[in-house]
Amino acid sequence: MQHAQDRFRARGIGLAAISYDSAAILREFAARQNISYPLLSDPDSALIRKFGVLNQTATGLTAGMAHPGYFFIAPSGVVREKFFETNYADRYTANNVISRLFPELVENASDFVSLPHLQVRTFQSDQTAGPGSRVTLGVEIKLPPHLHVYAPGVKGYKAIALVLDGNTMVDARDALYPAPKILWLAAIKERVPVFEGTFRIQQDVIISKDEKPPGGKISLQGKLKYQACDDKICFVPAEAPLQWQLEVKPLDMTRSPDAIRHKK
Amino acid sequence: MWLPKPNRKRSARRRGLPLAAEIVLIGVILAGAAAAAPPPGETRSTTPPGLHAGDNIPEFSAIDQNGRTQTLAALAGKNGLVLLFFRSADW
């Protein structure tokens, strides 16, 4: 988050965090974690309620806590976007939010690798994340001029697909494809959804809260399947292996000093 | 000024569902939740919680870790504010 603050600031966006903790707890936490962005105290959960993100089933020590997530708010006070999981225990990472708000800021990207008819590189929103974090993996694909690949939903052709191999360390969400361009192919008198130029396919995964990856590392494998075509011919369908590495850092379980911590 | 969003349960009655039907509905929802067995302190739902895109946030001022009073105007950059709600810095 601290690193994320600089990335947000460079884009003219402020960063703040809010919880039901007392200002004393937040002060101690900020000092321990070297946090310089504002941590707002909402000890009676009044703001958490007003934003509609109170966890209503929390009891005892946790009564009053918020569901974890982000709002992106315009200076006028209008909510532009929200990043809250439907499964309330899962959390977007700060870098994941940045990559959604500013998709052009691709970090942690590999070099482009040349495959038949196109170039591809992998990227990921985070290299290190905690259990329960939502991390975006993806591929960026660069096609030379006059070539296209078919988009999902095409009939009679092989659509491009990012396929992640099963892995018990993560819960994989559906791959997200950009909106396709509809191409009119005069030679065959057909309208087909395609991708051209440079585009990205994203694949979110949520790191398991239960599994302990060996050595704290998760290696995720996948495949890119596609068929490249120009306006006259289609080439042989191709398939390329993909790989992403994730480091899982344990959650900070240190509690605040006795005197200021939440009481049951 | 913050106004609560219309409550689904209440709007069901406005649309003319009798109270008994509403209670049965809630009963079914609760039974469903129990069957899905969410971990303690968590709820399973199909819609993310909270204000939606396009909503106005409530006026707010809050004390930060350094004792300073913060508002949207103080926190936002020229392009806005990313506000993270987190569970706790304590446990």
Image (cartoon, rainbow, N blue to C red):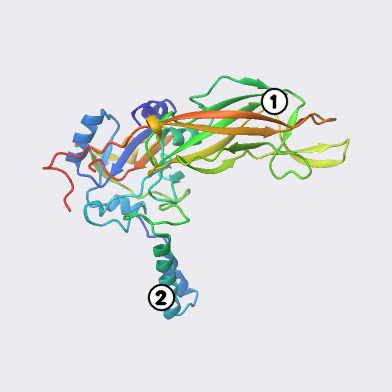
- Crowd around label 2: few <14 · some 14–19 · many ≥20 (10 Å): few
The residue wearing badge 1 is A143
Label 1 CA crowd tier, 10 Å (few <14, some 14–19, many 20+): some
Image side of residue B8 versus residue A146, left or right: left
In the image: residue A231, left or right of residue A23: right
Which element carries disc 1, helix, strand or loop?
loop
Which amino acid lies under the numbered mark 1 shown in the image of this protein? Leu
Q: Residue at the location (18% across, 48% down)?
A: A262
Q: Position of residue B10 (x, y in %)?
A: 42, 70
Quadrant that contains the C terminus of chain B:
top left
Q: Secondary structure at mark 2?
A: helix
| Foreground residue among A204 and A3 | A204
**Which one is in front, A220 or A181?**
A220
Q: Which residue is mark 2?
A: B23
- Quadrant housing residue A199: top right
Cα distance between the residues tagged 2 and 1: 57 Å
From this view, report whether residue B48 is shown above or below residue B68: below
Residue A127, visible in the rendered structure: yes
Q: Where's residue A211, x and y in %?
A: 39, 41
Q: Chain of mark 2?
A: B
* Residue drawn 31% across the image and 50% down it: A48
In the image, is B57 to the left or to the right of A148?
left
Query: Please, is residue A133 above or below residue A11 in the view?
Result: below
Q: Which of the 4 image quadrants contains residue A224? A: top right
Q: Quadrant of the N terminus of chain B?
A: bottom left
Q: Amino acid at mark 2?
A: Ile
Which disc, if any, is residue B50?
Answer: none
Q: Is residue A13 visible?
A: no
